[in-house]
Image (tube, rainbow, N blue to C red):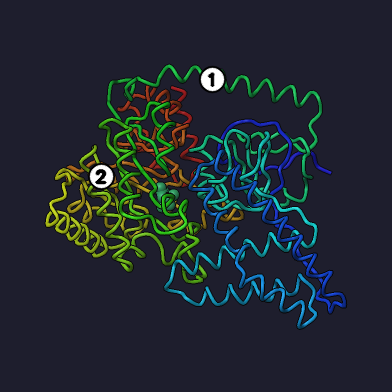
Amino acid sequence: MTNKLTGIAASDGIAIAPVYLLVDPDLSFEEKIIEDCEQELVRLSIAVDQAKAELEKIRQLASTQLGEAEAQVFDAHLLVLSDPEFLAQIKNLIEDEKMNAEASLQKVADMFIATFEAMEDNPYMQERAADIRDVKQRLMAALLGVELPTPATIDHEVIVVARDLTPSDTAQLNKKYVKAFVTEIGGRTSHSAIMARSLEIPAIVGIKGVSEAVTQGQKIIVDAIEGSVILQPTESELKEYQDKSALLRQNKEELKKLVSASSLTSDGKSLEIAANIGTPQDVEGVIANGADGIGLYRTEFLYMNSSDFPSEDDQYQAYRQVLEAVDGKGVVVRTMDIGGDKHLPYMTLPQELNPFLGYRAIRISLDKQEMFKTQLRALLRASVHGDLKIMFPMIATLSEFHQAKAILEEAKEELAQAQIAYSDKIEVGIMVEIPAAAVLADQFAKEVDFFSIGTNDLIQYSMAADRMNEQVSYLYQPYNPSILRLVKFVIDSAHQEGKWVGMCGEMAGDQMAVPILVGMGLDEFSMSASSILRTRQLVSRLDSQMMKELAERVTKECSSSEEVLDLVKNYLAQ
Ligand code: PEP
Ligand code: MG
């Protein structure tokens, strides 16, 4: 058996710890006709008590380790377990139909789920369906004597190994104990990978078969710089990686000296190196790493970490908190980008064959205008507390931008009528992440205040290579001259109209792409907080004129990523 598995390094670092396997348990059972109803009812009652006890423990741990908001979801589960109607129907099936407890539970739970799910327009009922699904799983596991993995309760150092981690699973991971994670599915720009970088948890994605290759509790090494997992480390391998990890820590200490430095090239050109965040809690890392501002606040996490649509007031508080925490530095807040790989438990999205090409981001906002306006009102109210810039995601046409702006104007109007203050200096821009917008950047540039290039999506759409699919990850090529030409056109178009342009896709913090982007004249680079200091150090070693020549050459002379990379290496060696 091989001792080493390789995948895609998604968040760098090294970890050595036992495995915590997060895989779906086998909850299959046999449907039986029972003879002893009394005994079956006792089995059910013991399972309900056990599930309740587990949930109470999880709730308490989640509240202390993750926060009260994350813990509240377990209250809803406890409520289902105490629902007399739900339990009475299961008992009835046992008594009247002589069905075993597992089959009775399945039948009743599925019926409840189907009823709630049918109420498509009622987010509250959708949420109840999700609660019942969770409770059914826990109760079934208790009946079958199977242990359920529960990441929120991890209370010792582990490496989480999973087939897949959704962004909300990732949000449940406690950084104190989860030293790394490894998944079978995903690419460098899947949202779990992006979150791992902002949480500074080392991560490797796209290792097929890893969850079957390890056992619970087995000690492994994760080298998330190389992208490899060592399954049965020898003493000498353990020592080697402990040393590597110490060196990494030392380098980080060295970089810390740049926390309050300006972001300047070697010839004194000033740039903005900003951070991407998902929640107000991430601001701590932004400040610790000395970011020049926030170039992307992915507000959808506010919606995802909640059990219902966040109210205008809740949103206002979150935006205000971020604006105040960065003390006057610019904050680009992106309106919510739900869809693709990001779902809300309380909102049913249509089943789509290609969700990344489907109902997502601004497309949802323009369809559900009340929801959109609630977010815009919250943003406008928060704008008086700092330097807010509003950005719309997934804009494909000018008409979408016009519609979004019109709704923003309506929201302003409403606030003005109610005599609620908002800033009159809010810049409004778009993400350039759909090739159609990139190609038409010269026209968009006349109307927007700024662009932020979203290369995570721009690359997947330009190369027709799903960012989540490790099988086509070889096509995910930030240095491909086709991508570089698009990026250059967007930058030039913005500058032609006197507008600034940033990049908030992962490419902005890519050490081989940064020299080219500096040469193209990109104004703002926004990245995971953990990449900021490394990028500031790199930029301080680059001469902007020399990089301009490099940028000209890669877009005019090169025909492949490999040629681009060779040229960059040549320039860096000069
Ligand atoms: C992008 O597409 O580059 C981007 C920054 O947005 P997200 O990764 O959230 O889709
Ligand atoms: Mg995007």
Relative height, residue 257 to residue 61 (above, below): above
The spot of residue 220 in percent (x, y) is 74, 36
Q: Is residue 323 visible?
A: yes
Of residue 47 and residue 491, the one placed in the foreground of this image is 47
Identity of the residue drawn at 30% across and 60% down: 372
Identity of the residue drawn at 54% across and 45% down: 193
Q: Is residue 556 visible?
A: no
**Looking at mark 1, is its residue's CB closer than 8 Å to ligand 1?**
no
Image-quadrant location for residue 425 = top left
Crowd rating for badge 2 (residues with CA inside 10 Å; few <14, some 14–19, many 20+) = many
The spot of residue 352 in percent (x, y) is 50, 70
The outermost residue toward the right is: 35
Horizontally, is 58 left or right of 144 in the view?
A: left
Amino acid type assigned to the residue bearing label 2 in the image: Ala
Amino acid type assigned to the residue bearing label 1 in the image: Asn
- Residue under pointer 1: 251
The spot of residue 282 in percent (x, y) is 43, 37
- Residue under pointer 2: 382
